[in-house]
Image (spheres, rainbow, N blue to C red):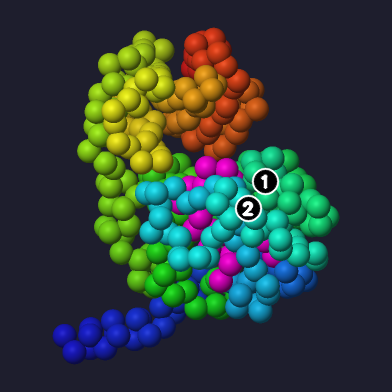
Amino acid sequence: MENKTKSAQSRQKTPNGYLNHFQFNRKFLDPIVKFLKKHDKFIITTHIGSDPDGLGSEIGIYYILKKLKKQVYIINAEKVPENYSFMAPDGLIKNTEQDLEEIQQMDLSGFVLLIMDNSEISRTGKILEISGKFKCPYASIDHHLVKKTKNFFVDASYAATSEIVWELFRYLKIPVSRDIAIMLYCGIIADTGNFRFTKTSFRTHVAGGDLVNAGANSDEIYRKLFESSPPDRLKLLRRILEKAIINTEKKYVVGFVKKEMFKKLKLGDTPTEGIVNQILSVRDIEISALMTETPNGDLKCSLRSIGEINVALLARKFGGGGHKNAAGLYIKGPFKRAAKKVIAEIEKALQ
């Protein structure tokens, strides 16, 4: 027993000791490190509608850059969603909704706009316009499938951008604190469906285990991300399921979230988060879609699939994108007509 205790204590003192034989993705990481060391000033941002992977990866890269003695700001398009507020250290993340006047007064000369978890620069929001006035070059660290572009460091073999940032920490031999471990673990489990999705790899599990060893509490994080909805969320889910199309013959399910469904409900600022995954979790369904009517009557759609069905290709037909098994799109209204178009493409994808 005494030997086992000493061994456990030794592992805690050297949490990355078991990574000695881990094969780093040097071909991918070296150009990123070279780019980060070359520049001295960075604005970090992520996509509109920030999610745990966007937030986790940008906070992680922030601390890497600070360790490299760079000048760094994190500026997003919107405030951090309420249910992810535990991921936002006080005052660290500014946004162009609430802090616009302060941001517009910044001298951003010589800064690089570093976009995390997003290679579609139009989805960065107003910070792109603000940084553009200073002619800031931009770069991206991402794991989505995109065309090769200069200074866009993208590898779709990673299950999450937070997984890339974790590997950068270990590659650069920068210590991972408990707070950073929590952020990166949040990003990884959100983008892998808690290590379920097909892009989850051996490397993803190594990252997850290492972050748990660094202090991330897996049960606590899972509950905060997936089991902290307000009670009215159940009422909304009932309204969605009452109107859903469940086509077991063609193997898809579509949920509709109309504006009137939100009446008299207290739901916070991410009311439909995760519902598209819930409606996929039944036998004989291969694609799920959640179509939300925006306040101005447009359609916002989240798509999920299983196996080899690529919903990212489907989403791109409407100007959207994402992963093979998880994607999204946005179509100008009217909502009903747009929904019919997306359903038609879903049926084509399943033929």
The segment highlighted magenta reads 42-63
Label 2 and label 1: CA atoms lie apart by 9 Å
Query: How many residues crowd around disc 1 within 10 Å: few (fewer than 14), some, or many (20 or more)?
Result: some
Cβ atoms under marks 2 and 1 closer than 8 Å: yes
Badge number at residue 126: 1
> Sequence-wise, which precedes: disc 2 or disc 1?
2
Q: Is residue 123 above or below residue 116?
A: above
Residue 152, visible in the rendered structure? no
Farthest-out residue, right: 135
Image side of residue 76 versus residue 37, left or right: left
Q: Is residue 26 above or below residue 15?
A: above
Task: Tell me residue 138's x, y (percent).
Answer: 75, 54
Residue 237 part of the magenta-drawn span: no
Q: Is residue 59 magenta?
A: yes
In this rendering, the answer to whether 347 lies above or below 218 is: above
Which marked residue is nearer to the observer: mark 2 or mark 1? Answer: 2
Residue behind mark 2: 100
Q: Nearer the viewer, residue 253 or 82?
A: 82
Q: Which residue of the protein is positioned furthest toward the left in this rendering?
A: 1
User: What's under tag 2, amino acid-wise?
Assistant: Leu
Q: Nearer the viewer, residue 221 or 22?
A: 221
Q: From the top left corner, tell me how far across and down residue 305 is, in percent.
A: 45, 29
Element at badge 2? helix
Compared across the picture, whether 232 is left or right of 285 comes to left
Where residue 267 appears, x then y in whole percent? 32, 37
Q: Residue at x 39, y 49 (%)?
A: 82
Residue drawn 28% across and 81% down?
A: 8
Asked if residue 215 lies left or right of residue 16, the reply is left
